[in-house]
Image (tube, rainbow, N blue to C red):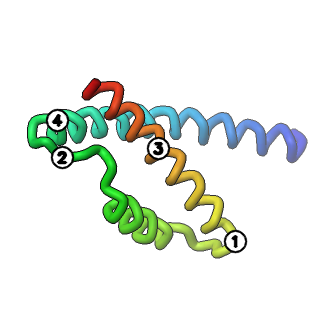
Amino acid sequence: MSELIKAREEIEETDRQMAALFIKRMRCAESIAAYKKSNGIPILDKGREEELIKKNEGYIDDPELIPYYDLFMRSVMDISKQYQRDLIG
């Protein structure tokens, strides 16, 4: 099996796992949206986002990947906030 095929298969498996984790994360966002709505809390909590990103960067052991992980997490959080806005209406 060529290295390219093997790498693509690993990406496909990783994508499958990420899809399952995405669903899990969005279900949590549903609960957060409901809580924020009932308690009159705004969706955006910039301080919490920055705190979470910095904390989670600690899970990345390759310094070269940290800026890309930062972009990834910001994208995920933007999607989560949009979903919460759509849920709250």
Read off the residue under disc 3: 78
Q: Secondary structure at mark 4?
A: helix
How far across and down, in percent of the image, does residue 83 sit?
38, 31
Read off the residue under disc 4: 37
Q: CA distance from mark 2 to mark 1?
A: 36 Å
Mark sitting earlier along the chain (2/3): 2
Q: CA distance from mark 1 to mark 4?
A: 39 Å
Q: CA distance from mark 2 to mark 3?
A: 17 Å
Classed neighbour count for the residue bearing mark 2: other residues with Cα under 10 Å, few (<14), some (14–19), many (≥20): few
In the picture, measured across the screen, residue 67 lies left or right of residue 37, that is: right
Residue under the point 49% across and 45% down: 76
In the picture, measured across the screen, residue 38 lies left or right of residue 67, that is: left
Mark sitting earlier along the chain (4/3): 4
Read off the residue under disc 2: 41
Classed neighbour count for the residue bearing mark 3: other residues with Cα under 10 Å, few (<14), some (14–19), many (≥20): few
Q: Is residue 38 above or below residue 47?
A: above
Amino acid bearing label 4: Lys
Read off the residue under disc 1: 64
Q: Secondary structure at mark 2?
A: loop
